[in-house]
Image: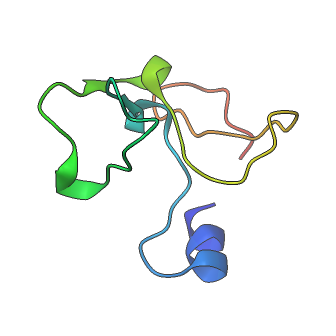
Amino acid sequence: ANSICSSQLGAGYKIAEHHDGRWVLGMSTTQYYGATWPATTSRGGWTFWANGNISSASRFWVYINNQDANCW
């Protein structure tokens, strides 16, 4: 899955992993990335938010590295 992401989107892109999730108050008005996340960032699977053009009617796979529920 990571190979498909990087071949379609470019070097450094990978499939999201459940534990990659981050959330911080006010993130709806500020785009954080890399080292720009503040120290008050909540981390973990249930804080996963993303910015993009994904329809709210869509469903998609997110890899979970400690579960057997992945489709591959």
Q: Position of residue 56 (x, y in %)?
A: 80, 34
Q: Position of residue 36 (x, y in %)?
A: 19, 51
Residue visible at 32% across and 27% down?
24
The residue most toward the right is 57
Query: Does residue 10 sit above or below 69 in this rendering?
Result: below
Query: Does residue 69 sit above or below 71 in this rendering?
Result: above
Query: Does residue 20 sit above or below 9 in this rendering?
Result: above
Query: Quarter holding the N terminus?
Result: bottom right
Query: Does residue 32 sit above or below 21 in this rendering?
Result: below
User: With 34 as the anchor, is 46 left or right in this view?
Assistant: right
Residue visible at 49% across and 41% down?
17
Residue visible at 31% across and 26% down?
43
Quarter of the image where one finds residue 63:
top right
Please name whichever residue, 1 or 39, is drawn nearer the observer in this view of the structure.
39
User: With 67 as the anchor, is 35 left or right in this view?
Assistant: left
Q: Position of residue 60 (x, y in %)?
A: 76, 41
The residue most toward the left is 39
Quarter of the image where one finds residue 45:
top left
Q: Position of residue 69 (x, y in %)?
A: 67, 27
- Is the image coloured rainbow, by chain, by secondary structure, or in one colour? rainbow
The residue most toward the top is 46
Please name whichever residue, 61 or 68, is drawn nearer the observer in this view of the structure.
61
Residue visible at 61% across and 27% down?
68
Number of dots carrying numbers: 0
